[in-house]
Amino acid sequence: MRTPSQAPSRPASRSGLSPRFLIAGALSLAIGFALSGAAKAGPTLDAIKARGSIKVGVGTQPGFFAPDSNGRWQGFFVDFGRALSIAVFNDPDKVQFVSSSPQQRLPALQSGEFDILLSGVTQTFTRATKLGFHFGPVVFYDGQGLLVPKKLGVSKGKDLNGATVCVQTGTTGELNITDFFRQNKIAFKPVVIEETAENQKAFSSGRCDVLTQDASDLAITRTQLPKPDDYVLLPERISKEPLAPAIRYGDDQWLEIVNWAIYATIQAEELGITQANIDSFLTSGDPTVRRFLGVDPSLGEAAKLDPKFAYTIVKTVGNYGEIFERNVGPATKVGLDRGFNKLWTQGGLLYAPPFR
Amino acid sequence: MTDGVLQSTQPLPPPLNRPPPRWQRLWAGLFGTPLNATVTLGCLALLGWAVPPLLRWTLLDAVWVGPADRCVDAAGACWAFIGEKLRYILFGFYDQDRQWRPAAADAILLALAGVSGMPLFWRRATLGLWIFGLAATLVLLTGGPAGPAVPTERWSGLPVSLLLAIVGLVGAFPLAVLLALARRSGMGGVRTLAVLFIEVTRGVPLIAVLYVATLLLPLMLPAGGAIDKLLRAQIAIILFVSAYLAEIIRAGLQSIPAGQYEAAQALGLGYWQSMRLVILPQALRTVIPSIVNLAIGLFQDTTLIIVIGLFDLLNTARTAAKDPAWFGFYDEAFGFAALVYLTVCVVASRYSLWLERRLRR
């Protein structure tokens, strides 16, 4: 799911001077120009308000972002896009979702094709510094896993000496798997494929011994294999994959809106506020709740936002837990466990700074 | 083996005026020689091996209606998936209550292409028809003249595929004619420019052209000067196709005997007059089959816009199988898209054959 910073400059293995290599060279040049002129380009938020809608870059992955039968985007990250639309426009539908492949989503964000990338990008040092992206709060803590057929008789990653590994191109997964095998001083043969579905086909047809992706993707993949019980997800996570929204440098106010719209969903869960019971909290005497929901309008006024933005977000898309359960939770076909993505109070990593 | 072939061809009667009955020729073709018989039996075995499972999957065990749960247990194809997703695959993100608009746009585009294929319509008035038809298509898709505008981000599915291919070809045509003429012209500067454009464009893959149009162009233009993404892709396709089309037209120009040029000059026609009235009508006529061939290729090449995040028919079909409610029916999705592409391309190639026969008369 994640593009590494150096992905474009990595020459394709088929030929020395592949078109991708040439494009990458041209791209990095152009991005250099763009960065030097970025300050003049004007803040993202002004462009959003002038346009009347937010452009959100997404991928396609069941449960996380996918169009339904009516051509309406649905999914975990999509709901956060709607939350942003509420924070800016007080309307969940003033948002355009723009699909982007792992290969081109970072250059596309850089070139201004969208205002925010909500496609499950891993927050990394290089992306934040060299590529010039600010990251919002982590919305999904993931880690790269290894899926193998049971008949391989392997119980841990270190046993995979000489294995053929299917990995998606243009993702941090491609770099992580190389690091993993190098660290353990064992050999492997990568089979690099761009499309997720193709990758899964290659794995199920036996072209490779191991499929490596984020554990969340592998859980979905496993359910789709002809005989799910013949495969096992190895226990280790070979990387940290904090998936966070990314925006371009140069618009601090936009970054704060992204931050606090997402924190609002986490804070709501912490306060026990859900889509269903939110109205009963409006009469609460708790000053934290009153500030959060905008009954006491001081916060919204300070941020030049609608004082009730948090109320509208939770009322419309729900709190973090509800967004998770509705799109990717155990009751859905994706069937993910909350794992790290629980509140800090429940042993997870989700923590919203105070709304005050 | 060779002996067998030679011997068995001997008894075949070679009368010129009375060909043998059809079944006899068929039999000779299928089993006339040991080699033919082996090939025939081999093909039959292959069919016998491949067809029954395919038939079971596509028809006998298939699920035609019902919810996704019924499909999961079925051994065959889930055509209920296509039924559920048909609207999305064809029209994508377009407003559901106004989908007659993309439907009508499709009809107009196909009708324009069909009408222009008939020699009866090869006249100047057809140009007006095209301008009118394309304008109507755009008005329909943008949501005008009355009603809220539909941004191009929501255009998707079949209309996008047809629009990119048909406008790509038609838009490239005038440019290609000029490029072909320039490449054969005596003016050195013009010729060099034309050669340069054609060779550079043909030397770069379409994907690279699309990447440049989507990712690099907005960076080079001043802020706020960005043109619509679909339009950028369309312009990229037009420029790309014009280079190939120019070479086809140049081949047509070269096939015209020098006598025609001289005759036009002798009549006192100037350069443009002789091109317009004498040379181009003949040259274009000879290359129509090649142009149809290019058009078929172009229609399939438009699927490459998937890499820049636009939704053509193939991409809507692909993403239809990403809906968690109907996840994983990729075979059905791609099968359906393939069927649509196959239909269009088979019709076009049959047309090309028909036209070739007609023009030879």
Image (tube, rainbow, N blue to C red):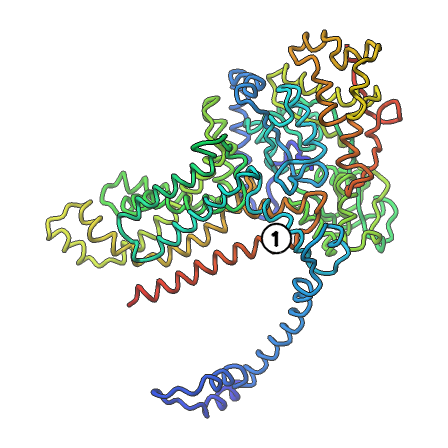
- Give the position of the C terminus of chain A as an image quadrant: top right
Where residue A262 appears, as percent x and y from the top left, is 72, 22
Q: Nearer the viewer, residue A24 or B243?
A: B243
Q: Which of A337 and B149 is in front in this view?
A: B149
Give the quarter of the image for residue A218: top right
Tag 1 subunit: B
Report the residue at 76% width, 32% height from top: A241
Report the residue at 49% width, 45% height from top: B103
Q: Can you say whether B261 is above or below B223 in the image?
A: below
Q: Can you say whether A24 is above or below B314 in the image?
A: above
Q: Which amino acid does label 1 sit on?
A: Phe
Give the quarter of the image for residue A269: top right
**Mark 1 surroundings: few (<14), some (14-19) or many (≥20) residues within 10 A:** some
Give the quarter of the image for residue B40: bottom right
Q: What element carries label 1?
A: helix
Q: Is residue A171 visible?
A: yes
Q: Can residue A17 be seen in this view?
A: no
Where residue A4 appears, as percent x and y from the top left, is 67, 34
Instruction: Determine whether, in the image, residue B31 is placed left or right of residue A291.
Output: left
Report the residue at 39% width, 61% height from top: B352
Question: What residue would you read off at disc 1?
Answer: B334
- Give the position of the N terminus of chain A as an image quadrant: top right
Q: Residue furthest bottom?
A: B11
Q: Which of A12 and B39 is in front in this view?
A: B39
Instruction: Determine whether, in the image, residue B132 is placed left or right of residue B308.
Output: left
